[in-house]
């Protein structure tokens, strides 16, 4: 059963070594992420599952101890999913963590996470909503007390300098997503249109819908801790408990 969730953005720029001189621009987001992770720790989970975009197709699972790095972004920073290898329920042998899960691993290490075993799940940005919510229900059933760290960004089309250039539909999409995340509205998250989200380069759509499936019937309340669009990309932090 899902007992808590933290929703965080996943730009590698959250890692100060990657952001370099621009690091202070995301200090607010980092602080909010730490606050959201504190909610997870307070929920006393039996298992924490980190969910983020990055699978080439469908779903890709990563066991505790899976490693990643940020060398592709020009810095020599290594991360590990959890503190010990081999404690997860999924088989070893997974490849390196995709960037979103690497950011999640970095956030956990930054806050000194040691409250429950950690596993990872990467989701394809094109995975259909019904399969996302089904995967979420499967995650919630894995242990008596499951917590999720859900990584994902909103639209990447909020300004002319954004990765997807400017799209006048992007702000409204992000507003709907922020409202759903802040109120733990699983129905609104599940209803996000996959094709529209893909056009707006909203990588968080599929992970958020995994969360929606996991939270069905859990009766969780949500709080939006951060909302902004630096660099023309929608970033949200929320805590569900």
Image (cartoon, helix red, strand yellow):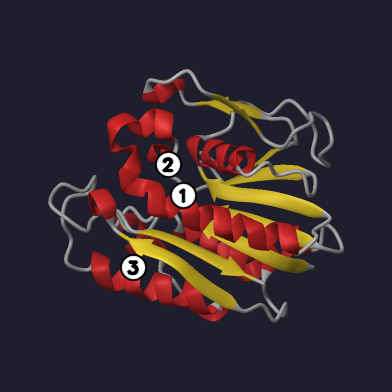
| Dot in front, 3 or 1 | 1
Residue 71 falls in image quadrant: top left
Which residue: 29% across, 58% down? 229
> Looking at the figure, which quarter contains the N terminus?
bottom right
Q: Measure the alpha-carbon separation of dots 2 and 3.
A: 20 Å
The tag earlier along the polypeptide, 3 or 1, is 1
Q: Position of residue 152 (x, y in %)?
A: 47, 53
Q: Is residue 127 above or below residue 170?
A: above
What label does residue 229 carry, if any?
none
Secondary element at tag 3:
helix
What label does residue 14 carry, if any?
2
Q: Going by the picture, which residue comes out furthest to the left?
A: 160
What label does residue 174 carry, if any?
3
Residue 186 falls in image quadrant: bottom right
Secondary element at tag 1:
helix
**Label 2–label 3 contact, CB within 8 A:** no
Residue 213 falls in image quadrant: bottom right
Q: Position of residue 57 (x, y in %)?
A: 54, 43
Q: Which residue is mark 1?
A: 30
**Is residue 207 in view from this perspective?**
no
Q: Measure the alpha-carbon separation of dots 3 and 1.
A: 20 Å
**Label 2–label 1 contact, CB within 8 A:** yes
Q: Position of residue 88 (x, y in %)?
A: 81, 39
Left or right: 73 as drawn, with respect to 98: left
């Amino acid at each position: 059963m899902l007992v808590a969730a933290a929703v965080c953005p996943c730009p590698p720029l959250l890692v100060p070594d990657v952001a370099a001189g621009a690091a202070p621009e995301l200090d607010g987001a980092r602080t909010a992420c730490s606050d959201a992770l504190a909610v997870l720790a307070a929920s006393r989970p039996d298992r924490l599952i980190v969910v983020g975009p990055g699978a080439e197709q469908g779903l890709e699972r990563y066991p505790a101890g899976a490693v990643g790095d940020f060398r592709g972004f020009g810095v020599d920073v290594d991360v590990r999913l959890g503190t010990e290898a081999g404690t997860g329920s999924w088989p070893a042998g997974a490849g390196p963590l995709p960037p979103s899960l690497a950011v999640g691993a970095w956030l956990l290490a930054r806050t000194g996470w040691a409250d429950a075993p950690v596993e990872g799940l990467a989701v394809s940005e094109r995975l259909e909503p019904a399969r996302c919510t089904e995967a979420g229900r499967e995650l919630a059933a894995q242990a008596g007390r499951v917590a999720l760290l859900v990584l994902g960004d909103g639209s990447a089309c909020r300004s002319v300098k954004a990765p997807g250039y400017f799209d006048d539909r992007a702000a409204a999409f992000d507003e709907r997503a922020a409202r759903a995340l802040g109120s733990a509205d699983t129905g609104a998250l599940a209803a996000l249109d996959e094709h529209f989200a893909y056009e707006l380069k909203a990588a968080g759509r599929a992970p958020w819908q995994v969360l929606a499936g996991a939270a069905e019937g859990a009766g969780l309340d949500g709080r939006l801790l951060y909302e902004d669009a630096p660099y023309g990309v929608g970033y949200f932090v929320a805590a569900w408990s």
